[in-house]
Image (cartoon, grey):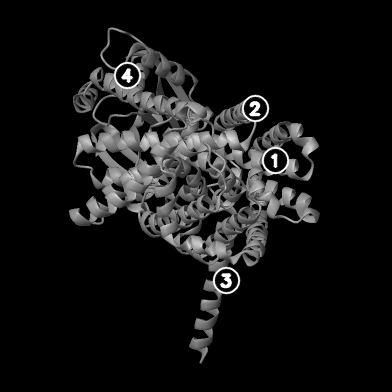
Amino acid sequence: MGHDIQQGISDADSKRRLATLALGAIGVVYGDIGTSPLYTLQTTLSHDGMRPTPESIYGVLSLIFWAQIIVVSLKYVTFIMRADNKGEGGIMALMALALRAVRDKPKTRWLLAIIGIFGASLFYGDGVITPAISVLSAVEGVKVAAPGLAHWVVPVTAVILFFLFAVQRHGTENVGRMFGPVMVIWFITIAVLGGRMVLDNPHVLYAINPMYGVRFFFTHGVQAYIALGGVVLALTGAEALYADMGHFGKRPIRLAWFNFVLPALILNYFGQGALLLAHPEAIDNPFFKTVPSVLLYPMIALATAATVIASQAVISGAFSMTREAMSLGYSPRMPVVHTSREMSGQIFVPWVNSFLLVMVLVAVIGFRSSDSLSAAYGIAVTGTMTITTVLALFVARHQWRWSMPVVIIAGTLLLIIDMSFFTANLIKVEYGGWFPLVLGLAVFIVMTTWRRGRELVVREIKQGGLALVPFIENITEHPPLRVPGTAAFLTANQNSVPHALLHNLKHNKVLHERNVMLTVEVLETPVADADERIHLTSMDGNFYGLELRFGFAEDPNIPLALSRCAKSGLPFDLMDTTFFLSRENVVADKRRPGMALWRDRLFAFMSRNALPATAFFQIPGNRLIELGTQVEI
């Protein structure tokens, strides 16, 4: 009896926790895709000579419905979310998972890394366009309520976005508690508005039949293909389902999608379609014209709140991705501010925040309407979706051991859909699609240049270094003066003598009693397991080789890690430990083989302005000695 009661309590707690996580997922994960009804149908049915005729309305609704089912429900929620990297998702986590799956194939690893970095670069383009188009489309509701105020849309949008980025440094912990309830109200509202229209014209539900989508292609030809560039707007935010998997888990995200979000979205899209069947002239803003006039201003306020939440999710994702890129060696080190004592994932990256703010304001002022911005939106989204499919297929083949025929069939079907959306958006390059491509290319150049530059620096240091074992033997035979305490030398190569050790011995003529060659390695998993965090090698002369390993989603805290080394046989008294670091002064030299001279100079500039390794590794400044060394690349 008692066991049954405990089991009942446990089940109740489990259900309550599941419901809480699902509510959080509705607020954070589904903000972007949840606000897409604001602009999707309007954009798709009014571009490139398209008119809201019954044939085009049924055809576009059918395409939107089946895109939600195939791309979001089957591809992302069912297939892609299986590829979790120790519970973490997102394109950087997926890239690390794919690289680990082909670790014995260096050429394949290099190709997958390039593809993954480009996909991550496009995400920053999405991080710029999403806040701009979302908030702009919400504020444009003013045009319906009071057409005379239309000239205030851009200034008001700019002010809202400036405020949104200004409050990032304070974190989203408190605001985050409001996200779920606000988005629940949003989805219920759009479902009721859409359902009301569907009841007035239930024939619109015929569009569920996929033959309407097929017929649309036969009757409209090239126009139908171009319309795919608008249909994909209904899928924006699908990547967030995967990216935020580590915060909420698979089951709450799937539960929220199938039981709440998907029905609300479908009802609203079909409700807008029902309105257009009766009133084609409402195409200038079908979303807000489903709203009763008495509720128009409250709906504009709710839509603005929902779009701010959608923007917040993308901005937070850009912060998290930047931290992962820094850990994996694809981005210069930047200051990272933790905004919550309870949740390590809530961070603020000032440089990224400033960059996004400037680019978002440029997009709003330059494009001036959500209709114009829609041309710029689809390319970044569809590019990232295609790359995610490619990386997931490698994981399916090499890690899940899917047979080659199954991978080929699944890959062909998914890539045909992804490439159809992507190529349909490429047509819009000259109309604004160039904007996220230029942004993505700039970020790609920065990331690949930093990665290659660090490889060249490490190569130069290794080539100019002395072998460690003969050095220790020589020290043992001709011992210098030893002073009490521990010296920890940060080095990238455990087999060579750190430059800082050589400089210290040369100029100060002393060695510490205990000398530790300290290397930090970032793994291709989000969190390092306890048994792989510390690897200690004891050498003669009281020298030690110490490797500290961190996951790419962790903050590498060296003092904290050293305090845990006692279990491995090397206790540290941090007050008696001095850290030595060689700080490289990188000089671009065109005579050296490596990158193009302009990339060498770009890397040298980034290296000079990057956050010092000591600050990144949280080494206290009063225990640190930095010794400079010049490196030519």
Q: Nearer the viewer, mark 3 or mark 4?
A: 3
4 or 1: tag closer to the N-terminus: 1
Say if residue 538 shows up in the picture.
yes
Which amino acid type is marked by label 2?
Answer: Ile
Q: Nearer the viewer, mark 4 or mark 2?
A: 2
Between 73 and 15, the one nearer to me in the picture: 73
Residue beneath label 1, please?
140
3 or 4: tag closer to the N-terminus: 3
Residue 106, x across and y down, in percent:
21, 36
4 or 2: tag closer to the N-terminus: 2
Q: Establish if 139 lies above or below 180.
A: above
Which amino acid type is marked by label 4?
Answer: Leu
Question: Considering the numbered disc 1 on the image, is that residue within a helix, a strand or a loop?
Answer: loop
**Mark on residue 502?**
4
Between 7 and 105, the one nearer to me in the picture: 105
Which amino acid type is marked by label 3?
Answer: Arg
Label 3 Cα crowd, 10 Å radius (few <14 / some 14-19 / many 20+): few
**Mark on residue 16?**
3
